[in-house]
Amino acid sequence: MSAESIDEEVPGHAPDDDGQNHTDHEHDDEDEAQAEADAAVMAQALAALDDDVLRNALAAMSEKSRLEVAAQLQLPRATMRLGDALVPLVRRKLQTAAPDHQLQVLFALAQHVNDQTIEALGPRSEEPTRDDLLEVLPAVIERHGAPLTTLMLAGYAASDARCRPVMRELLETDDRFVIGPPVEVDAKPQLEARPEPVLDKKELEAKREQRRAAKEAKRAAEVREREARLAAQAKRRQAVHDAKRKSQ
């Protein structure tokens, strides 16, 4: 199970009279349509992750994967330490990310699912069959849950891996890997000013009295401070005067 691309020769047909190979052109169009469909399914699988699954996946990933997610979603590294606030932020970013960025984030989220699946497959992991996957996936689902396992399958189906056809087939035919509805994306919180509380006449008068008392207390404190400062200056002058008299 590797996402590396490979070049495969597809048998073509002899060119038509106009010198063009229409069969190859149609094949390319079909491949492009399939790739777009696979990318759409991948986006749906990401959008269907509920908050708990997404939160746990973000918390469980390695530091290297955490930094990779930040880079792919164009987030400052510090935001990866936001805790619960990170989940809606990542969800919003994933919604608008390009498919190649979504794919990189997907494999970071499904890192442990992928590792266990590859380990269980052993030498068969490069190009597993449907039967190979049906043999090992129940244990993966038991440990990591169906949503993340489904996410991994969708990621491989949208990649250039050799196993993409069998991954796509499982997504389309196995009820355990049905992608649920998308989780609603929270809008960015709006910081709105709170309305001033409505006070009755007595409360208003009490507020005014408190303000008057505070002003008077402030003025009294300023007067005391000024008097203390003048007194200190007078003492210093008297001390200097007394010192001069003694020296004469």
Image: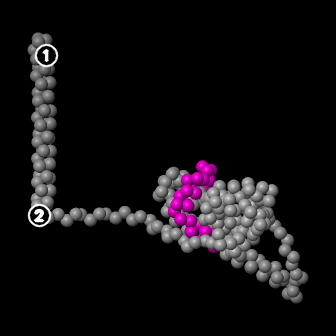
Q: Is residue 45 magenta?
A: yes
Secondary structure beneath disc 2? helix
| Main secondary-structure element of the magenta-colored stretch | helix
Please state the extent of the stretch shown in magenta in the rendering. Answer: 40-68
Looking at the image, which residue is at 84% across and 74% down?
10
Q: Badge 2: how crowded within 10 Å, few (<14), some, or many (20+)?
A: few
Looking at the image, which residue is at 68% across and 62% down?
138
x, y percent for residue 154: 66, 68
Looking at the image, which residue is at 76% across and 58% down?
121
Q: Tell me, for residue 243, which label it has, or none.
A: 1
- Which residue is the site of mark 2? 201
Q: Earlier in the sequence, mark 2 or mark 1?
A: 2
The reply to whether the C-beta atoms of the residues labelled 2 and 1 are less than 8 Å apart is no
x, y percent for residue 112: 65, 55
Q: Tell me, for residue 46, which label it has, or none.
A: none
Q: Residue 53 versus residue 46: which sits nearer the camera?
A: 53
Type of amino acid at the residue the image marks with label 2: Lys
Between circles 2 and 1, the one closer to the viewer is 2
x, y percent for residue 207: 14, 56
From this viewpoint, which residue is outermost toward the right? 14
Q: Is residue 240 magenta?
A: no
Q: Residue 61 versus residue 116: which sits nearer the camera?
A: 116
